[in-house]
Amino acid sequence: MLSRQLLPNVVVGDVALGESDSEADLYLDPADPTSVHVSLDREVFESAKGRANATRKVSVRRLDSVAREQGWKRIDLLKIDTEDMSLRFSRSREPSPRRSDPGNPV
């Protein structure tokens, strides 16, 4: 886990990014709690791990909603794992403003 004392400007969010603010099922393997194979897409999960037998409800948020709520003026680096969800993720923010707009971080 990242330490806020070592990396005070790093924010780790327990949230899924998506096209709209909502809630979704996160498919996971309860027999392997350390597995990196989790997904919001049942088919993606089942192709990697077999039958989806457990889920956990997660908050799904638009990137621009998270940025606004956090009061971010800019995002220098964003690390995400989109699996096969990259198109959905790309719709989670408004179109990019011109670089000269300091009021919009995304």
Image (cartoon, rainbow, N blue to C red):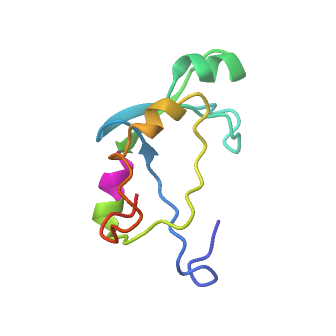
Residue nearest the viewer, comparing 17 with 1: 17
Give the main secondary structure, helix, strand or loop, of the magenta stretch.
helix
Q: How many marks?
A: 0
Residue for point 63% across, 69% down: 2
Describe residue 90's horizontal placement relative to residue 67 as left or right.
Answer: right
Q: Quadrant of the N terminus?
A: bottom right
Residue for point 57% across, 38% down: 82
Q: Is residue 63 magenta?
A: yes
The picture places residue 38, in percent across and down from the top left corner, at: 60, 34
Residue nearest the viewer, comparing 66 with 99: 99
The picture places residue 50, in percent across and down from the top left corner, at: 68, 16
Q: Is residue 97 above or below residue 41?
A: below
Residue nearest the viewer, comparing 106 with 38: 106
Q: Quadrant of residue 101?
A: bottom left
Describe residue 34's horizontal placement relative to residue 92 as left or right.
Answer: right
Describe residue 12's horizontal placement relative to residue 49 as left or right.
Answer: left
Q: Magenta region: which residues?
A: 62-66
The picture places residue 59, in percent across and down from the top left corner, at: 36, 44
The residue most toward the bottom is 5
Q: Is residue 37 above or below residue 53?
A: below
Q: Is residue 31 magenta?
A: no
Q: Is residue 19 above or below residue 101?
A: above
The picture places residue 27, in percent across and down from the top left corner, at: 54, 29
Residue for point 35% across, 36% down: 19
Q: Is residue 103 above or below residue 52?
A: below
Q: Quadrant of the C terminus?
A: bottom left
Residue for point 32% across, 46% down: 94
